[in-house]
Image (cartoon, rainbow, N blue to C red):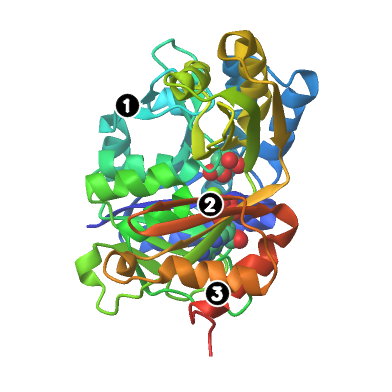
């Protein structure tokens, strides 16, 4: 008998008809003889609304209370899906993160799963009961509800699949697989039958929201087989697999964009040892992650330092820098949230030169200015003005020969 974890995202549980559709898919899996645990997200739009409530009261709100608020979306959908399953004649019950329990650290708002106690779930699944588990949430060592960061239900699903020693983790969503880029921006993007963990990890980490980064990392480490597929159509999806299971390796296999970053420039920073440590040390102490960084050398002993942080962290970053201004000694902080990061990803980059150059050429041909560049072994990212996002992604998709025929 197989044991599977089925995860359904926000659009898959957007209303009662969608929830009935999910119930019938789960019922089919049960009737096919599988033991099933289901992980659900909040109904589409609900988490955004809950986040907006917190921000509406205070941009620098208490992260523990933020978690208490935003975790509620998933509680609703677990209960509703359990009811829909019972209505369809399938034995089911809902589980909140703290009930399983799904234990996490105490990094509220971006907690990491530390362990899942799966014994009781397995016992019930073996007796024929479907476990409907809230994605996105857990319980910290402070005994309070935590959430795993936006898109975190994917990670809940993979972690649960690992803990339950499931044969598969099927991620059902509103697209029928992983494409060469977001099919909503490039309609002639191609669906990939397979993608390597490494490439999926890189694509996710630079903004391809189809899977949360941490979920891919976990799947890779715990050897969980992920399949991304549609909740609405019965077509084969995309398998995330080891690199050696992919025969045709492309130089570039995918393009991603992120509008979640903001650019910060510190003007006239003293150009001396210890300054980078002071700036980024202060930010990291306040839990602000920094991504791309450039520093311009100047003649007069002063420099401009530009870097990106996530938009959600921008108020905290600005407050932190304002507090450290006297100690670091820069003249002003400029913040620009109207930027987008565009990235090209492919394992073939390890062995092929010229990938970055193709990118710069294609953007130049569209007169798109590059503000910051960063690279890794299998990725090149550039920061551009947000208004050029679609244009840049489409131009690059064509430049790398990824357009569907
Ligand atoms: P869910 O609510 O099911 O978790 P998400 O919105 O988080 O769904 O993720 C699915 C979305 O990811 C798709 O609707 C699509 O717009 C976006 N996406 C971005 N990049 C890609 C890609 N390379 N392939 C497929 N979908 C992508
Ligand atoms: N509901 C959460 C979010 O919108 C988690 C998820 O959907 O994965 O971020
Ligand atoms: Mg998602």
Secondary structure under the numbered disc 1 in the rendered image: strand
When the figure is inspected, residue 237 is found, relative to residue 81, above or below; the finding is: below
Decide which of 372, 134 is in the foreground and name it. Answer: 372
**Residue lying at the far left of the rendered structure:** 244
Q: Is residue 166 left or right of residue 102?
A: left
When the figure is inspected, residue 273 is found, relative to residue 360, above or below; the finding is: above
Image quarter of residue 198: bottom left
Decide which of 211, 169 is in the foreground and name it. Answer: 211
Secondary structure under the numbered disc 3 in the rendered image: helix
> Pointer 2: what residue?
207
Pair 1/2: label in front: 2
User: Residue 196 appears at what percent x and percent y?
Assistant: 31, 63
Bin the neighbour count of mark 3 within 10 Å (Cα to Cα): few under 14, some 14-19, many 20 and up.
Answer: many
Decide which of 68, 308 is in the foreground and name it. Answer: 308
Q: Residue at x 22, y 57 (%)?
A: 1
Q: Residue at x 42, y 39 (%)?
A: 156
Q: CA distance from mark 3 to mark 2?
A: 16 Å
Q: Is the shortest distance between ligand 1 and the CB of mark 2 under 8 Å?
A: yes
Q: Which mark is residue 114?
A: 1
> Pointer 3: what residue?
397
**Residue lying at the far bottom of the rendered structure:** 405
When the figure is inspected, residue 326 is found, relative to residue 129, above or below; the finding is: above
Q: Is residue 138 left or right of residue 4?
A: right
Q: Earlier in the sequence, mark 3 or mark 1?
A: 1
User: Residue 279 appears at what percent x and percent y?
Assistant: 52, 21
User: Residue 244 appears at what percent x and percent y?
Assistant: 20, 68
């Amino acid at each position: 008998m197989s044991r599977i974890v089925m995860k359904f995202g926000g659009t898959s549980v957007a209303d009662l008809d969608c929830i009935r559709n999910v119930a019938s898919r789960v019922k089919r899996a049960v009737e096919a003889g599988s033991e099933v645990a289901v992980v659900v997200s909040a109904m589409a739009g609900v988490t955004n609304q809950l986040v907006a409530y917190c921000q509406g009261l205070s941009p620098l709100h208490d992260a523990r209370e933020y978690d208490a608020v935003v975790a509620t979306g998933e509680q609703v959908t677990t209960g509703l899906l359990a009811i829909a399953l019972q209505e369809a004649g399938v034995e089911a019950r809902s589980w909140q993160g703290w009930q399983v329990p799904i234990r996490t650290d105490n990094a509220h708002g971006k907690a990491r799963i530390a362990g899942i106690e799966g014994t009781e779930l397995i016992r019930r699944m073996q007796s024929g009961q479907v476990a409907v588990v809230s994605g996105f949430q857990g319980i910290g060592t402070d005994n309070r509800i935590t959430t795993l960061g936006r898109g975190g239900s994917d990670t809940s699903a993979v972690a649960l699949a690992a803990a339950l020693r499931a044969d598969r983790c099927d991620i059902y969503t509103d697209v029928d697989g992983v494409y060469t880029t977001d099919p909503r921006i490039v309609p002639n993007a191609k669906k990939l039958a397979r993608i390597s963990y490494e490439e999926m990890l890189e694509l996710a980490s630079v903004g391809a929201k189809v899977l949360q980064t941490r979920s891919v990392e976990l799947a890779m480490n715990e050897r969980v087989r992920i399949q991304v597929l549609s909740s609405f159509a019965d077509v084969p999806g995309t398998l995330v697999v080891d690199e050696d299971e992919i025969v045709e390796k492309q130089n570039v296999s995918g393009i991603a964009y992120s509008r979640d970053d903001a650019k910060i420039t510190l003007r006239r920073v003293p150009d001396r040892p210890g300054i980078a440590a002071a700036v980024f040390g202060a930010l990291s102490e306040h839990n602000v992650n920094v991504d791309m960084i450039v520093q311009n050398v100047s003649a007069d002993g002063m420099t401009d330092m530009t870097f990106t942080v996530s938009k959600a962290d921008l108020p905290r970053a600005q407050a932190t820098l304002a507090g450290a201004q006297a100690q670091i000694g820069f003249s002003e902080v400029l913040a620009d949230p109207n930027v987008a990061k565009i990235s090209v990803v492919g394992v073939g980059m390890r062995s092929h030169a010229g990938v970055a150059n193709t990118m710069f050429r294609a953007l130049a041909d569209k007169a798109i200015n590059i503000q910051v560049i960063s690279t890794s072994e299998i990725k090149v990212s550039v920061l551009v003005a947000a208004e050029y996002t679609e244009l840049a992604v489409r131009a690059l998709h064509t430049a790398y020969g990824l357009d569907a025929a």
